[in-house]
Amino acid sequence: MTGEPLLSLATAAAVGFGAGYVGSLMVVRRMALVGDALSHVALPGLALGILFGFDPFLGAFVFVLGAAFLTWFIERSTHLAVDAVVGVLFVLALAVGVLLTPNPDLLEALFGDVRGVGLLATLASIALAAGVVAVTRLIYRSMVLSVISEDLAASAGVRVELVSLVYLVLVSVVVAVGVQVVGTLLVGALVIVPAAAAKTLGTNLTRYAVLSAVFGVVSSLGGTALSFAWGITAGPLVVVLGVTVFLVSWGFAAVRRRRAGDAEGARPV
Amino acid sequence: MDNAFLPGPQYPRGVVRGRTEREMDSRPTPGGPFALLSVSALTVRVGRSTVLDRVSFSAARGVTLAIVGPNGAGKTTLLRALLGRVPYTGRIAWNGSVRIGYVPQKLVDTDIPLSVEELLSLKCPGDYGACLAMVGLGPGTLDRQIGTLSGGEVQRVLIAWATVDRPDVLLFDEPTANVDVGSEDTIFSAVRRVQTETGTTVFLVTHDLHEIHHYADRVLVLDHHVVFEGAVAELFRDPRLVAETFGLRAGEELPFEVGAHR
């Protein structure tokens, strides 16, 4: 299905920016794998939307939000290892989703198809991405403090539990919106890969967060543009481009470290 | 912050509302007009075990109170209760509006692209260079990433963080547990300087006899309940209590002369 390329590119750019920015917190929280698994939960929601005729992305959002609440609850209220529980439950969700999704729609649900978005979906994506970025900006300080020490954050007046819950809601929105671009299997990559790339280059928080959002736009927008040019699904291209950005950043950081090391060695003692 | 008449565990209101300014307690604080903090029958349960059992003590303004006791005695839990991070029963009453600065034992995660200047700016606007100078760190430290600092430097940055908004109370959780030998004096002289300049009250959780002897005015010995509360000199006059508290063997002498530095 091919619609208006401009709409697709605008959607991809907005989603890439939101996912990159929100993802920068996910990587410092060491929740990269949880984020990836969380995204798979979108599939049963999408399937129910397709089966019962309501907006599939609403279904995806409700399911991811439910999974996010469950993660938050397990993290806060039990002694269970979150990663193990998340690994088991969320893979089950993926399996159930695949069984429920009608066959003709399965490929699109798994890998997305941003080339088919309409005006309404584009406007909704831009509005949601803008909202997510605005709220993330508001809680960025509190989240970073909570990562380095929850007690330290609390001593500075941060409501640690509340902020963590708000963040999971933001991740759910980004995942639900991102599913259009890269599908449920790969949306985790849209959130994590740009931040991982930015972290290799970031020397301070501002630079890191901005780079993460920019890398999100580059991979999402670039992958979608290539998908129009080559006539293939955007999702995998977005991810391959994102990983390429990561590898280039990593190489660049390694060269920079080596140069810094040489300069240090050359300094008179 | 009065929990005495409420059923079940309660969080102190100041923190739950996301503020470090503590609410004014309408009743007079026991322990005299100069008492900053009065804690009575503070009890914290985690699951079935009672971590703090009817702990009562008070602290005057400007003093350094050392909180000592064996591992698992509830020292850190006491600090966390004062911060409002654990549910408790009993009463924690601050005399007036109190701003608390907290210095944790260590940071949970430092693998973050976060500079020292950014860390300080996450607390409040201020003169960060002067703040670092007070803890003996140069202005060059502002641009460094927190992950590249040594244990001693992290502690000093944390003290700067805790003192940047001139708090009334500083809570220290074993500030020298993760630093190199020799950094302790630098850290404590920084604390002293802050205390002299701002009249801050310091609560210091520690295992170190030296630290108590050199830096504390009063001691609270904790083993789930209060074993001893009094002046440092008073504690050192009781060799049996000192031996029990610090695990000294029979006949083992203190590694310094009592009273020499005070």
Image (spheres, rainbow, N blue to C red):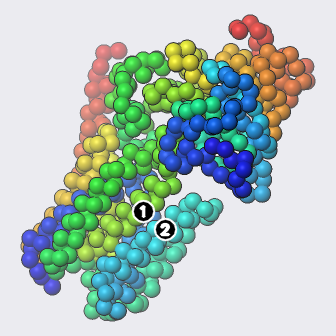
Residue A218 found in image quarter: bottom left
Quick check: B16 above or below B210? below
Q: Residue at x 45, y 64 (%)?
A: A34
- Which disc, if any, is residue A260? none
| Residue B138 x, y percent position in the rendering | 39, 19
In 3D space, how far apart are the residues under numbered discs 2 and 1 (Cα atoms)?
Answer: 7 Å
Image-based side of B219 in relation to A64, left or right:
right
Which residue is most to the top? B260
Q: Position of residue A85 (x, y in %)?
A: 55, 70
The residue wearing badge 1 is A168
Q: Quadrant of residue A42?
A: bottom left
Q: Give the number of the disc on residue A69.
A: 2
Query: Does residue B14 appear to the left or right of A109 in the view shown?
Result: right
The chain carrying label 2 is: A
On screen, A249 above or below B21? below
Q: Determine crowd level at label 1: few under 14, some 14-19, many 20+ residues with C-alpha closer than 10 A.
A: many
Residue beneath the point at 18% across and 72% down = A122
Q: Amino acid at mark 1?
A: Leu
